[in-house]
Image (cartoon, grey):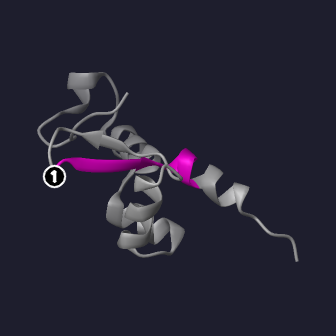
Amino acid sequence: MFFRSHKGMTAMDIGGSEKKIEKRLVVEYLTREEAARYLRCSVSWLDHKAADGKIPYYKLGNGRTSKVLYKVEDLKKYIEKRWVEI
């Protein structure tokens, strides 16, 4: 389950430790900038691949300023599909 933000939430609010919550947010979903760093590419390249349907993304909200997130597992799959043995 994705939480919008852990700010303002305590561990008691969602039944777990704060450390566990932060790790879950960081590990499962990345922002555009974080995903680009993860793939070692530019944000614009990542945007093009997402727009072409090559890399799945999750859009939170409607409009141009919506938050876009990438699931780490999807990024790993993208990399693994393009692995070349030398």
User: Which residue in the structure is indicated by mark 1?
Assistant: 64
Residue 23 x, y percent position in the rendering: 41, 46
From the image, which quarter does the N terminus lie in?
top left
Q: Residue furthest front?
A: 52
Q: Is residue 12 left or right of residue 36?
A: left
Q: Is residue 42 magenta?
A: no
- Residue at point 51% right, 52% down? 55
Q: Which residues are magenta?
A: 65-75
- Residue at point 71% right, 55% down? 81
Task: Using the rendered view, name the quadrant where residue 78 is placed.
Answer: bottom right
Q: Is residue 80 left or right of residue 75?
A: right
Residue 44 x, y percent position in the rendering: 36, 71
Residue type at mark 1?
Arg
Residue 82 x, y percent position in the rendering: 71, 62
Q: In this view of the protein, which residue sits in the foreground, 62 or 25?
A: 62
Q: Is residue 21 left or right of residue 36?
A: left
Is residue 21 shown above or below 82? above
Task: Using the rendered view, name the quadrant where residue 22 is placed.
Answer: top left
Q: In this view of the protein, which residue sits in the foreground, 4 or 74?
A: 74
Is residue 30 shown above or below 83? above
- Residue at point 48% right, 75% down? 41
Residue 72 x, y percent position in the rendering: 51, 50
Q: Residues within 10 Å of mark 1 (few under 14, many from 20)?
A: few
Is residue 32 shown above or below 84? above
From the image, which quarter does the C terminus lie in?
bottom right
Q: In this view of the protein, which residue sits in the foreground, 22 or 27?
A: 27
